[in-house]
Amino acid sequence: MKNRLKVLRAERDWTQADLAKALDVSRQTVNAIENGKYDPSLPLAFSIARLFDKQIEEIFDDEE
């Protein structure tokens, strides 16, 4: 799944570790999501959307 997580994170000048701490996940999880190797659970996707004050659809894009 494509996503804008890396761009949104960079806009706030956060490292992957900073974002991981804010979301209570590992840095490896953030890395995997950013690289499209892992699709977040729905609760995690909502947490990410709330953190960046965006709709889920503004962050994640189903490639179908």
Image (cartoon, rainbow, N blue to C red):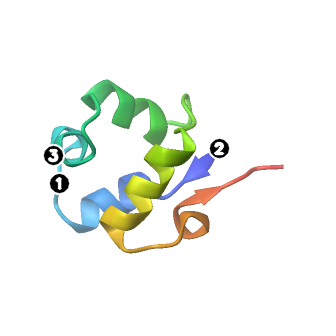
Label 2 SS:
loop
Residue beneath disc 2: 1
Label 2 amino acid?
Answer: Met
Question: Quick check: marks 3 and 1 in contact, CB under 8 Å?
Answer: yes
Which x, y percent locates residue 59? Answer: 52, 62
- The residue closer to the viewer here, 26 or 47, is 47
Of mark 1 and mark 2, the one earlier in the sequence is: 2
Label 1 amino acid?
Answer: Trp
Mark 2 packing: few (<14 Cα in 10 Å), some, or many (20+)?
A: some
Residue beneath disc 1: 14
The answer to whether residue 61 is left or right of residue 11 is right
Which quarter of the picture shows residue 18? top left
Which quarter of the picture shows residue 58? bottom right
Label 1 SS:
loop
Q: Residue 18's mark? A: 3
Viewport quadrant of the N terminus: top right
- The residue closer to the viewer here, 8 or 42, is 42
Label 3 amino acid?
Answer: Asp
Cα separation, mark 3 vs mark 1, equals: 6 Å
